[in-house]
């Protein structure tokens, strides 16, 4: 099948996945308010297009950590990504290599970071959950550098494992085996600002902090020499009742004052969503659920097709906004409005429920 829309990839994933895996993909924590608010926040921004600008050619490229991204997108880390396709992160890596963006590899997926570096060489960022003491962490970082990783991402919003009630209600134990509460992430819970300072002092690799949600923490990251801040609420899967990531983005961008790039994820499903984040100051946008849907639909080919479709949506949005280059996007192109649809994990695909 030739996929002509992102919705078709989502529909294919829903058909292929069993109930437990589908719920893992689209679900959130507790009431799923944070998950829904991510989409509500994105839908609360409308465009203010400008006319009579020459948009016969539009540019979508951006640079990050020495890599030229064909579109301002990264494929976000997904734990246990192999449940969506047996090739797991290797399939994503192949698509990323062929298209021209960056992958952030989760430390709790297959293949592991060293095997993947051999299977699919190329620039890549490694995301770590702490599963040992400082000596263990230092060893992992050193091995990632030796394996050729061009960035290191520390996730800071997972001090404990949240309550995923879709799993609890079904008495389903995730394949990761992680437990609700502190026992599931005992070392993550010990992470402090000193952990960041230690990494910066000891290792020469760009450091990204994922899970930044407020200006105060963003500013402190920049002061400590962190190379990139990543606005995220874990897709609404950790702390419930947080703000939408798109709503937290402007204060984080203002706090770092241009000193470091800012990434963001949380509910992004369409090219227009990506453009909104760029208008508000993001350097690039992380995609998680969309990545997993495309991987489920058709493996590496599905992920590649997702990126091609997303590129087309971004190009069209830029042209219709009257903007030639993603670098020219700014907040003046947006205005707050009342959303038109009830938000949920799939509300970016309004025709899905109609059977298309």
Image (cartoon, rainbow, N blue to C red):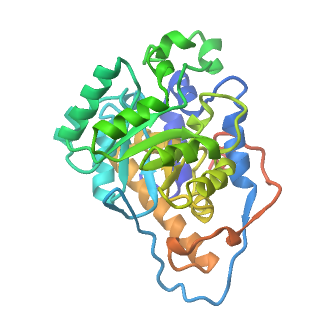
In the image shown, does 311 or 122 lie closer to the viewer? 122
On the question of residue 323 being in view, the answer is yes
**Viewer-nearest residue: 252 or 219:** 219
> Is residue 132 found left or right of 29 in the rendered image?
left
In this rendering, the answer to whether 124 lies above or below 31 is below
The residue lying at 53 percent from left, 32 percent from top is 25
Q: State the residue at coordinates (58%, 49%).
A: 268
Residue 28 location (% of width, % of height): 63, 29
**Relative horizontal placement of residue 132, taking residue 188 as reference (left or right):** left
Q: Position of residue 99 (x, y in %)?
A: 33, 59
Q: Is residue 294 above or below residue 160?
A: below
192 relative position to 37: left or right = left
Q: Is residue 32 left or right of residue 157?
A: right
Residue 9 visible in the picture: no
Check the image and report above or below for 206 versus 327: above
Q: Nearer the viewer, residue 251 or 11?
A: 251
Is residue 81 shown above or below 320? above
Q: Position of residue 329 (x, y in %)?
A: 58, 71
């Amino acid at each position: 099948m030739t996929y002509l829309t992102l919705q078709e990839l989502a529909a294919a994933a829903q058909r292929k996945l069993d109930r437990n895996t589908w719920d893992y993909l689209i679900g959130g924590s507790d009431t799923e308010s944070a998950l829904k608010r991510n989409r509500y926040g994105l839908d609360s921004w409308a465009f203010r297009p400008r006319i009579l600008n020459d948009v016969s050619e539009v540019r979508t490229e951006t640079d990050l950590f020495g890599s030229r991204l064909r579109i301002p997108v990264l494929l976000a880390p997904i734990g246990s990504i192999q449940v969506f396709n047996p090739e797991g992160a290797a399939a994503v890596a192949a698509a990323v290599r062929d298209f021209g963006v960056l992958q952030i590899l989760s430390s709790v997926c297959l293949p592991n970071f060293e095997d993947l570096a051999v299977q699919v060489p190329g620039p890549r960022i490694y995301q770590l959950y702490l599963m040992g003491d400082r000596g263990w962490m230092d060893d992992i970082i050193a091995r990632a550098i030796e394996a050729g990783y061009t960035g290191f991402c520390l996730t800071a919003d997972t001090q404990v494992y949240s309550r995923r009630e879709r799993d609890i209600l079904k008495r389903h134990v995730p394949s990761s085996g992680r437990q609700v509460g502190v026992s599931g992430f005992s070392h993550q819970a010990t992470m402090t600002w000193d952990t960041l300072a230690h990494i910066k002092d000891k290792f020469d690799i760009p450091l990204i902090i994922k899970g930044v949600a407020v200006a105060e923490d963003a500013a402190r990251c920049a002061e400590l020499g962190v190379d990139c801040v990543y606005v995220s609420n874990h897709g609404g899967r950790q702390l419930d009742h947080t703000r939408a990531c798109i709503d937290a983005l402007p204060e984080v961008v203002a706090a770092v004052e241009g000193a470091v790039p800012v990434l963001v994820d949380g509910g992004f499903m369409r090219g227009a969503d990506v453009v909104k984040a760029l208008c508000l100051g993001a350097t690039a946008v992380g995609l998680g659920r969309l990545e997993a849907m495309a991987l489920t639909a058709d493996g590496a080919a599905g992920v590649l097709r997702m990126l091609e479709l997303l590129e087309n949506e971004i190009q069209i949005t830029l042209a219709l906004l009257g903007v030639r280059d993603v670098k020219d996007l700014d907040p003046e192109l947006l205005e707050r409005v009342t959303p038109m649809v009830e938000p949920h994990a799939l509300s970016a695909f309004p025709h899905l429920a109609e059977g298309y």
